[in-house]
Amino acid sequence: MSNNSEESMAMVYAEKKKLKNGHFTILLVEDDPPLRAILKSMLEIQGFNVMETDSKIGAMAILGDDSNTIHAMILDLGLPPKAHTTEEGLDVIVQTTSAMHATKIVVLTGQDEEKSALDAIREGAFDFLSKPARSEDILTAVNRAILFHSKEKDLSADGMTRLQLNAKVADGLKAVREEAEEKLVRQVLKETGFNIYRSAEKLGIKRESIYYFMKKFGINRDDS
Amino acid sequence: MTTVDLYPYLILVGTSILAGAGWLLYQYRMQALRSQELIRLNEELEYDLPDFLRQCWQSLQKGGFTGIKWHLDWFGTNVSGSNGRLEGAVIEKKFEVQEISLIISLYLGKSGWEQRYFSNTLADNFFLLVRMNLWIKLGTVKGAFDQSARMTVFLQHDVKNMAQLISLSADQLENPVAGQEDKVLESLRTAIPAVRDRAQHMLNALMKIPDNNSKESEQQLEQVLQQTASAYELPVAISGSASVNVQKDTLQSIIDNLLGNYSRQTKKHNQPVLDLQIDLENNGKRVVARITDYNGEPCLWPERLFEPFWSEHGSGLGIGLYQARQQAMAAGGTLTAEAMADKPLCFILSLPVV
């Protein structure tokens, strides 16, 4: 095992100790039952809680229930009903990031490597592994994802929010600023359970401004 | 001199004209036969250009040519051939397409103008056959490469999953976690037979052997339709209810391919604009499902619907509907489309009842 992965593992073990139940939860999204079974077994042997599903709908249902307790997701991009394309898997990434779920996504896929990796990372995946990947590499990626998840939670507690923006230079600063504003407002509203007063306080702006942004970006309470 | 005196001359001229016309007609007929001979030879040789060049001489010789010489660069290999006397007037033609180039010289010797005229006609037909063989070869090569590339996409998915299964199994055996041996053994009990079955399944698919593990069984058609539509997030109204006698995987694949088209349409419009209606009817022998999107537009290319490797948007593999039709037929059913100029497209799937 490389030094990096050893360090990464050590930090995750340290994080694990901080948690009361001592467990991290991984959501496994893979449509191949035997492969899902062996991945689940490998992760459980390493002490992770594993939730599993074979489709986009299943993944979004599990995340929707309680995404805060799911630290990382191992995602196959080729999911039914379009198992031979990356469409469903990329949709999972898009929906997860637009719903501001904190879960970190590690893509593990057999689809065309270069294009899939680019698409996945652009949509907000945390890491990309190409099948067949070694257990060690999968665990390293998962551990890093968990580490980032935990650190982002710490930062969030300190009032910091991490945003992912895909900006085109040609669109100019205004477009980037608007996207950042929208994501930040959505994120804070989600974190405060749509409490306008607390969101305004957290963002350091007036409540009226929150209402203004909600109207401007079409943010509804249901979006949370 | 009276008119009567001219009769012998007129008869002579008329007879000469008739004889000339008859001879020309005969020549024309003979050249047509030579052309047909060349076409038949080409068919017998299955449009193979090198073989055609090697065996065409006999027909060309009968057509009045005194010699032939050719030089062929066939995908990097150079071959040449010649027959007869290479002298006199010559018709030369050069072909150059992608990885094939060919120079042919046909010799006419010392022939009269009328012989040259007919020989030129035969030469045109001969060159046309050569050009056709060139394009058939290139089309076949391109088609085979395209098909191979597309099938690779399907195989890669299965092979990579199998490689992943083997890799994880090997890792668990190489680096066992103390106290977890039972769990490792348990997971290998799932993985190893799965690898075996997967390998056999792929081998069967490559060798086109039917999968004996799957047997026809009773399937609730409306249930499969509803579940697949849900997976694609398609709003659908299903009327009727029916059980069909088809392999589970086959039915799922047919319905996946059929509804997959509507899913792409929904994505293209970025919102569900479908008014998808599926009517099921059981006539005692068969279940007929009529699938129509009443918000859909008439199909502009009905002849392309079931053509393999043809995709409307260019991004698809283009085998979905082709595969669905093949599977429906293999299951004892049919898959057709009703395309009218002023009505939305309707797919009609017919499957045997239980």
Image (spheres, coloured by chain):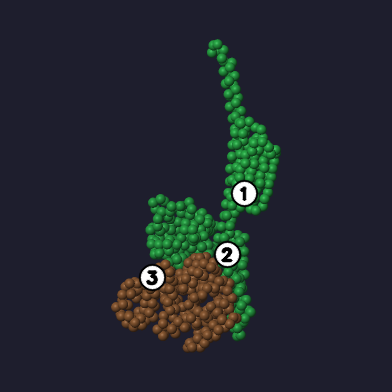
The quadrant of the rendering that contains the C terminus of chain A is bottom left
Crowd class of label 3 (few under 14; some 14 to 19; many from 20; radius 10 Å): some
Assign a secondary structure to mark 1: strand
From the image, state whether disc 2 or disc 1 is nearer to you.
1
Percent position of residue B59, x then y? 65, 38
Up/down of A28 relative to B279, above or below:
below
> Which amino acid is tagged 3?
Ala
What chain is tagged by disc 1?
B
- The residue to which callout 1 is attached is B101
Q: On the rendered structure, is A212 left or right of B81?
A: left
Q: Which labelled disc corresponds to residue B155? A: 2
The residue at 53%/71% (across/down) is A109
Residue B95 x %, y %: 60, 46
Colour in which the image shows chain A? brown
Residue B249 seen anywhere in this rendered image of the structure: yes
- Picture quarter with the N terminus of chain A: bottom right
Return the chain for callout 3. Answer: A
SS of the residue at dot 3?
Answer: helix
Q: Colour of chain B?
A: green
Q: Gap between marks 3 and 1, in whole Å?
A: 56 Å
Contact between marks 3 and 2 (CB within 8 A): the answer is no
**Frontmost residue, B190 versus A6:** A6
Q: Amino acid at mark 2?
A: Leu
Q: Residue at x 49, y 71 (%)?
A: A120
At x 61%, y 61%, the residue is B206
Give me the C-alpha separation between circle 3 and circle 2: 42 Å
